[in-house]
Amino acid sequence: MSHSHRRAARPARKRRAGIALVVLAALTLLLLVAWLWALPAYVDQRLSRTLAERTGRQVTIDDVAITPWRSRLTLEGLSIAGQDDTAVFAGRRVVAILDWHSLFAPGWRFERVDLEAPRLQMIWHSGGEWNLARLLGGDEGGGGETMPLRVARLNVSDGRLDWINRRPDEPLTLTLENLDLEARGYDNTAQRPFGLRGEADWNGGTLEGEGEMGFSPWTVDVDLTAEQVALTTLSGYLAHVVRAQPAAGTLDARIRLRAGRASDAGTRVRGRGQVAGLEMRDPESDDPIARAERFAVEGLTFVSAQPRLTAERVTLEAPWLKVVIDEGLDTNLDAWRPPQSSNAGSEGGGMRYAIDTLAVEQGAVAFSDRHLPRPFELDFSALTGEWRQISSAREGDGRLSLEGRVADGSPLRIEGAFDPLGKAMQGNLNLHFERLQLGTFAPYLRAFGGYAIEQGQATLDLDYRLEQGRLQARNHLVLRQLQLGEEVDASATDLPLKTLVGVLKSDDGVIELDIPMRLPLDNPGSVDFGSVAGQAIREALENLVSSPLETLSEVAGGDGEDGSDADNDSGTGQTSGARSDAEATDSDEDGPAALYERARTRQ
């Protein structure tokens, strides 16, 4: 071929090569466009199918957008169906920075995932499993192959979390709103937990948390801080601790929560907290039965395995307690016992409770006895002291030391051992009341003495022994300047009470009585308190008649309640015409000896 022909062929070959390159570039571009056009549909289909297989629920995605040069995947309207038309997960927008290997390898890898306004329902079923464990934790014993899911960093903004606990008979739900969360290092193919930190609004307060969590196996180890959370938020859980129901109060707490692999005793909670403005109500009448300016707990520990709730110290500032004895001699104090408390402390029988120290500062009690014909009310104030070693696992412990004042300003002191959490009432208590105004106790004195009280003071030393459902009491009563008024109930006693008061008074106007008593707590109405009072008077008279009866005659003064004269000769048949005043008094119907005999033989 000549040189000129070769020179003419070169441009032709170049043109053909250029055309081929253009065609190849066009085909490549067309394929790229087609791939980019089909990729969102492919991702939509693959993600929907994978999530549906993993959760066993219907999955929908409204729109998928891909930005290849930024490796960004955007999902609009991602939803995983739940029950009752409520999605178990719903996200307005999910933006993920994708590791491109995920398109060609099993599973998914993300460098970063941002969730905008997601809503998640985490359901703890009665059997202990979580609703999203298969998705978030792999197969976990299901026998299938785990789908790899790795997220280097997860950010949640403006989210909502509903934690639904279906293990109790009545499901409990705790809701967090405006949730901002950051999680790092999530990998469902590894057993190590991932780190997380976040904060949320919790029923008017805030909750912050930081720690670790894992789904396969289930693991929680987080530090939580709650501030200004309404106590009613936890009503469902408090119902397992005490029957009384919270009506007001805000919670501040610092706790550490461990569960699953992070704990060797089931769910474990350790921390401290306080409730300001506490108010509790009776579960039956809905009446307020307690208030406190501040209720603080230190050293709180709860474990769910062999359930136990303990506290190192509980402090009540300015508490107020309402105590009512009703017409049937039952009290409202049962509201403070844990549900099924009859089993408390027994092996395998309910939750156990223990408080090392219960401190009371400037407390008050409103006491009301409605079983009397005229209701009796009495207030106690300035109550300050401590109750130590309260426990449902022991009986007869619980060292109590408390001081305060009665409504009229009289001081009181309570000391002894008594545990209100024990399954049986056991203990020993000493109650000391100094110089009480007897008018305060007029309803009781009307019921048991039959007379109104015009004036008088009482000092009481009450020793109570609670043992096997019975109350044994040894009560020492000192009465000063007692004056009886008009008779209000003639049937209350058949003893001449006014005359007896005159007999029993010492020169300085003091009467001392020892009143023993045995009371079955399951049937307190079976006790005849009139007989108890009569027994005390009889013993006091027996002590007096060990001295010459002349002394009794002088004290009685012959002014019997029936108006008879103690010096009147009633003709007893004695042969001697001259009798001493004592002998005459002995024969009188209401003389001291007769009074003694009537009191001695009265049952």
Image: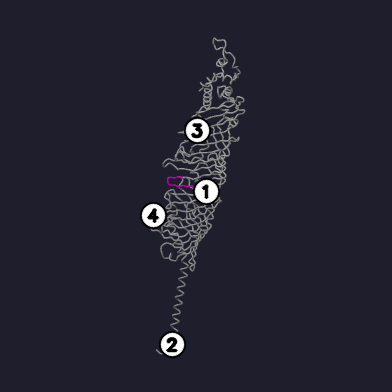
Please, which residue is most extreme toward the left here? Answer: 143
Q: Is residue 307 magenta?
A: yes
Q: Mark 1 Cα within 10 Å, few/some/many (few <14, many 20+)?
A: some
Horizontal side, residue 1 vs residue 562: left or right: left
Q: Amino acid at mark 2?
A: Arg
Q: Secondary structure at mark 1?
A: strand
Q: Mark 4 Cα within 10 Å, few/some/many (few <14, many 20+)?
A: few
Q: Is residue 181 above or below residue 411?
A: below
Sequence-first tag of 4 and 2: 2
Sequence-first tag of 3 and 4: 4
Q: Is residue 157 magenta?
A: no
Q: Secondary structure at mark 3?
A: strand
- The label on residue 464 is 3
Q: Which residues are magenta?
A: 296-308
**Cα–Cα span, label 2 and label 3:** 128 Å
**Cα–Cα span, label 3 and label 4:** 62 Å
Q: Position of residue 344 (x, y in %)?
A: 45, 40
Q: Is residue 439 above or below residue 257?
A: above
Q: Main secondary structure of the magenta part?
A: strand
Residue placed under numbered mark 2 in the picture: 7
Sequence-first tag of 1 and 4: 4
Q: Nearer the viewer, residue 67 or 52?
A: 67
Q: Is residue 392 above or below residue 225?
A: above
Sequence-first tag of 1 and 2: 2
**Cα–Cα span, label 3 and label 1:** 35 Å
Q: Amino acid at mark 4?
A: Gly
Residue placed under numbered mark 1 in the picture: 273
Q: Nearer the viewer, residue 101 or 14?
A: 101
